[in-house]
Image: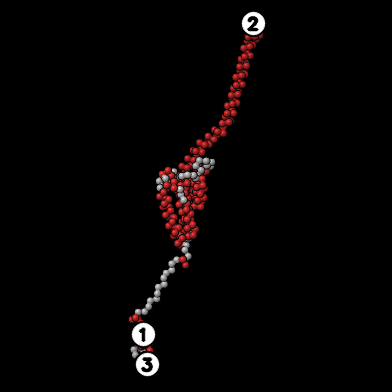
Amino acid sequence: MTDLSTDPATQTTSADTTAAASALLAANRRRRRIRRWIAIGTLPLTLAALLFVGKLLSMYAFAHQSISAYVVDDYAGSEASARGQEFLNWFEPFKAPFNVGTALAGAEKLPEARTKLEESLELAHGLEVCTVRINLALVIERQGDAAAADGDGAAAAEFYGEALTLTSETPEECNSEEAQQQSSDPDRDMQKTKEDTEDRLKQKQQEQQEQQQPEEQKPEEQEQPEPQPSDEKLDELKEKLEQGQQERDQRQDGEEPGGTGTDKPW
């Protein structure tokens, strides 16, 4: 019987098989290393893509919550939702401070609202500035109303002047249909709101300025001349004087005055 372990042909086949298996294992290890490095290399891109999608979804969610809360006068809830848009505020960066400022204005936190809307205006570009300018002007107008209610007419007039300047400097492009479509409130006619605001501010500013005029600058009332006695009164007065003189002359002569003996007032 032939010993297979000593057969040269069998030994060659076994060696070839072992070499092929080793080469296959080595190739598999190389492929695994390549896949691992590819996975590591693309991990930042994968995370960025997930973050991008998550940010988009969160923006729409926070914006919807902020608007819904504002509609039902839940200004605190609207503000909280709008502040959620501020994290990693890459897309339309003006919207987060705009929504926060609008919510603060609804809660009558006017100084804070103005600060956020001014921040929004700095971040806005193109037609984005239209709706921001309108809301900012309305907030400043309400600051003027509050100052007027407190009796500070000078501060009220200053606020009205600032709001009027802001409104009058609104770009002409804001009167376009495209700007109307981008408005935060499409049901509000942007051009009409702008014109009404300007007229209202001019009237309020004028009223406050008139109230602040010094007394000496106001037209003085004309002095009414003292009424002069009529000719009839003068004649009557003359008769009384003559009668009084006659009575004095009679007393001096020892005569009794006529009438009741009582001097008449004159």
Q: Amino acid at mark 1?
A: Lys
Residue 236 percent coordinates (x, y) = 34, 83
* Circle 1 residue: 238
Mark 3 against mark 2, which lies toward the viewer? 3
Callout 1: SS: helix
* Circle 3 residue: 250
Callout 2: SS: loop
Q: Amino acid at mark 2?
A: Thr
Quarter holding the N terminus is top right
At 40% from the left edge and 47% from the top edge, which residue is drawn? 189
* Circle 2 residue: 2
- Disc 1 from disc 3: Cα separation: 19 Å
Q: Which residue occupies the foreground of this view, 71 or 134?
A: 134
- Disc 1 from disc 2: Cα separation: 181 Å
Residue 77 percent coordinates (x, y) = 48, 46
- Disc 3 from disc 2: Cα separation: 194 Å
At 65% from the left edge and 9% from the top edge, which residue is drawn? 8
At 42% from the left edge and 43% from the top edge, which residue is drawn? 178
For disc 1, the neighbor class at 10 Å (few under 14, some 14 to 19, many from 20) is few
Q: Earlier in the sequence, mark 3 or mark 2?
A: 2
Mark 1 against mark 3, which lies toward the viewer? 1
